[in-house]
Amino acid sequence: MLRKVLVANRGEIAVRVLQSLREVGIPSVAVYSDPDRQALHARLADESHRLEGASAAETYLNADRLVEVARECGAEAVHPGYGFLSENAEFAAKLEAAGIRLIGPSSQVIAAMGDKVTAKQVMEEAGVPVVPGWTGDVSALAEARRAAEGLGYPILVKAAAGGGGRGMRRVDTPAGLEAAIADARSEAEKSFGDGRVFLEKYLERPRHVEVQIFGDRHGAAVHLFERECSVQRRHQKIIEESPSPALDPDLRARMGEAAVRAAQALGYENAGTVEFILDAQRNFYFLEVNTRLQVEHPVTELVTGLDLVRAQFAIAAGQPLPFRQEELKQEGHALECRVYAEDPSRGYLPSTGRIQVYRAPAGPGIRVDSGVEEGSEVTIHYDPLLAKLIVWAEDRPSALARMDLALSRFVILGVRTNIPFLRNLIRHPSFATGDLHTHFLDEHAIAPAPPGVLQEALLVAGWAATERPTVAAGNRPSRSGAGARPSPWLEAGNWRLA
Ligand code: ADP
Ligand code: ADP
Ligand code: MG
């Protein structure tokens, strides 16, 4: 096993990784920025080191500083989580040079997959279907126009270095092409320091279906089935699930095989995700490989019964894959909702402040991966993802009912969250029938939430009524109607409620 692991991240994913480190008994190291001095992740590790500053650039994106901390504390490996430096080939190369292992694939694989143009070429050669596109020089506008006509509008201008949904522009008519290229280029230049763009056929109402892969140093590769992540806002996933309601066993097997072929073509080591886009005719096309653990990995954990982070540690330590393809099973149905500090009724404006009340739901089949607790400060410096609510049940309708219940019991006060919006979303009839596509939120007007003050008052009232019974209340007719029996626990006396 690994001797010591540094977690180069924050929030819920750092907490998640630290928990598995503790379970397997690997000494853990956290890093924290100045605003994160009191953060949950900084307190859960065996040792924590300060990254001076507040901005992401000064702290969690500061590759040199992170390598220095890893070296000083004697970490054998670094877990990068997702976001930040997780897909940064230079960071991976710096760690390699310092003799520290990245829990992920090699810097060469990260670099190759970080470039969408290279990635598409590799996949095409490996026989994996890719979205029809054109990767010529877009500054030769006449050629770009001809290529776009050839693909047929609408098309998508896409950044080669893209990620997080940035650097993409849809073009519906030839008249819009030049401006879209200029826009995508400048956004890509700003976000990634790399303005290269290419053209892709734009698929209408597609589904986003991705396959979890794992490979080891000894040449073995498997897939852990699919996740559907079609419900997106600005190309960012909001709800994820497994299995995908769109797949049958045959299509699932073909997509799984294509993903394994991709892993083998790359000599892929550790966890990764092959993203596909699925059109209305059920053709699937390669989108990209995410060379890291994905935000939505818990849905795969719940349907396979595996701890993907533990598997990552084993593979990074040089062990063979802990599972063979024939042994893997996809059982029941899992759903994940991303809980953000944002206000859907005000254009999804990020919401900051102190979390005054935090009550996470619990119960059979309910999992909450959270980076916050009561008293946590939510700042403007980082991603507004607070927590992920994941549920498992025998089938999709039961999982939806369970998610509905769990959302109704999730109380976060002090910052605005998208919880009421998520609840309206999963209750939508088209969500229930599984008729999902990447424009779901454009086509269906999902109510953001009841007005703020009312909503909070209701939450507090509901919380007080359901969660804080008193002995005195138990002696009166209960909420459920006159004459109802008091809770049997109340008869046990005061000590029960202490
Ligand atoms: P996943 O594919 O795991 O769902 P996302 O694409 O939603 O991941 O990205 C995960 C996190 O990483 C998000 O917070 C996103 O904003 C951030 N992210 C993704 N790509 C980049 C990038 N190239 N640069 C900076 N942040 C990124
Ligand atoms: P990123 O690296 O930013 O995650 P992706 O290539 O994975 O970029 O695409 C993100 C999302 O954008 C997809 O999930 C899908 O919703 C949309 N998208 C990407 N390519 C296409 C396409 N050719 N046609 C339609 N939608 C697309
Ligand atoms: Mg993507």
Image: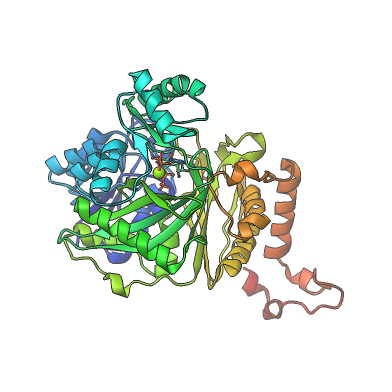
The image quadrant of residue 398 is bottom right
Residue sitting at x 41%, y 67%: 250
Q: Is residue 376 above or below residue 175?
A: below
Residue sitting at x 48%, y 50%: 279
- Image location of residue 289, percent across then percent down: 32, 47
Does residue 415 appear in this view? no
Residue sitting at x 81%, y 78%: 484
- Image location of residue 144, percent across then percent down: 37, 24
Residue sitting at the far right:
482
Q: Quadrant of the C terminus?
A: bottom right
Q: Quadrant of the N terminus?
A: bottom left
Q: Is residue 63 left or right of residue 171?
A: left
Residue sitting at x 86%, y 78%: 483
Question: Between residues 445 and 379, which one lies in front from this camera angle?
Answer: 445
Q: Is residue 477 above or below residue 433?
A: below
- Image location of residue 315, percent across then percent down: 22, 60
Question: Between residues 11 and 166, which one lies in front from this camera angle?
Answer: 166
- Image location of residue 240, percent across then percent down: 49, 55
